[in-house]
Image (cartoon, helix red, strand yellow):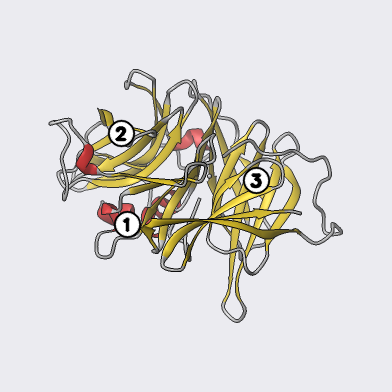
Amino acid sequence: MRRFSTLAMLAACAWGADQPPASVVQSSKPVTAQSPAPVAIHRGRMVDFTSVPAGMVMGPTKCDDSGAVYFRQYKPRDVYGAAIVKLDPRENRSLVINVSSIGDSSVAKAPTLRFVDFTVNGGAVYVAATNEDAKAYILKFSAGDGSFQSAISLEEKFYPMKIAAFNSGALLVAGVKTTPKPDSTSALQNDTVLIDRTGVIAKHLNAGDWGDTKGDQAVDHERLDALSMSLMEGAGTSAYLIQSSAATTLAVVGDGGTVEPPRKLRSPGEDYSAFNLRASGTSILVEYVKDLKSSGTVTEFVLYDLSLDQPVQVYRADADVGGALGCYDGRDGFTFVNNHGGHTVLMNGSLN
C-alpha cells in the first residue's frame, strides 16, 4: 500500500509549491474560443519568513479564512515525514505542526507515523495519517498553536488518501481498502467514507456513487493512481473532488453524504492537468498546469460557475509570479508560496 500513498504525495509536489479558499468571485460571461486572452496576475509585495528555510513545497497547500497559508515542505528520503507549515502574513508568523505534538498513547509516533493528506476548517487542521502497522487515523490539531487535540482510528485495511472538512465538523475521507480473496490475496477498492462530527463513520460512498460503471468490483492500479492524484476540497456544506483528464470530472458531495451526478468541466486543453482547487458557493477555481518542455511551464487558473457547468474567467500569472497557489480572495487578489533569498516567502499577486 505504500506505493499508492507515495503517488498521492509525489503527484502533489510542485515546482516550488502546491494548493487553497477564501470565497470565489462569480462572473457572468462564459469563456469561449473567441474570448479575450487570460487576465494577467501581476506580482505584488512579498512577505519573507526568515524562520522557514527555502525548500520544495508538497501538496496540498491550504488557505484559511484569515489568509494564512498551510503547506508541507519536501523532506528528502522521507516523503511522509514532512511537517505541516503555517505562514500567517498578518503577523509575519510561522507555525509547524508535526507528529511530536501528539499526546494520544493509542496513536503511533514517528518514525512509523506518516502524514498523507490534510485540510483546514474552523480553526482546526485535520490530518489523514497511516503507520507501518497498516493502521490509519484522522488527527486533529489546533490551527492556532499547532497543539494536538484528538484522534479518530479508521477501519482496519482502509488507507486514506484525501480528506475534506465541512463547516458542520463532518469529514469526507477518500482512500482504498483491501478485502481478502479466496486465493489468499487481497482485492483493492476505492472507498470514500463520511465521518460525522462525533468521529463515527456515518456512511460509505462506494465507487458506484461516483458514476463508476465498475461499481463495487475490485479497482485496478491505474484507477487507484488516478484517485491518489485527484484533488478534494471542502467548502461550507459541500465537498468537491476532481480527477483531471481531457475533460475534468467533478464530483460534489453534501455533508449528509448525498452525491450529485458527476459533471464534466472543460479544461484548457488535453495536455493540462488540474493541480489545485478552491471552492465557494456555486463557483470553483481550478489551477491547471501545462509542462511545455521546450518553453517552460504554463499555469492557468480557471473559474467555473457550477450553475452553468462552464468556465467564466481565466487567469494567467506573469512570468515573475512563481510558486504555488496559496489563497484567492474571491476578487482580484492571489497569494503564492515561493522561495526567495534562501527563505520561504508569500508573494501577493493582483489583477491591477
Residue at the right extreme, as displayed = 34
Disc ID at residue 138 = 2
Q: N-terminal of the two: label 1 or label 2?
A: 1
Element type at mark 1: helix
Image position, residue 189 (x, y; %):
35, 42
Q: N-terminal of the two: label 2 or label 3?
A: 2
Instruction: Say which residue label 3 marks.
Output: 264
Element type at mark 3: strand
Vertical comparison of 259 with 59: above or below: above
- Kindly report which numbered mark, 2 or 3, lies closer to the viewer in this rendering: 2
- Whether tag 2 and tag 3 are in contact, CB under 8 A, the answer is no
Vertical comparison of 73 with 147: above or below: below
Q: Label 1 to label 3, Cα distance in Å? A: 28 Å
Q: Residues within 10 Å of mark 3 (few under 14, many from 20)?
A: some
Disc ID at residue 6 = 1
**Which residue sits at x=53%, y=36%?**
66
- Kindly report which numbered mark, 1 or 2, lies closer to the viewer in this rendering: 2
**Which residue sits at x=20%, y=39%?**
135
Say if residue 221 shows up in the picture. no
Q: Quadrant of residue 236?
A: top right
**Which residue sits at x=48%, y=42%?**
91
Depth check: give the residue in front, 322 or 252. 322
The amino acid type, in three-letter code, at marker 3 is: Lys
The amino acid type, in three-letter code, at marker 2 is: Ile
Q: Is residue 253 left or right of residue 223?
A: right
Q: Quadrant of residue 73?
A: bottom left
Q: Label 2 to label 3, Cα distance in Å? A: 31 Å
Residue at the top extreme, as displayed = 198
Q: N-terminal of the two: label 1 or label 3?
A: 1
- Whether tag 1 and tag 2 are in contact, CB under 8 A, the answer is no
Disc ID at residue 29 = none
Image position, residue 90 (x, y; %):
52, 42
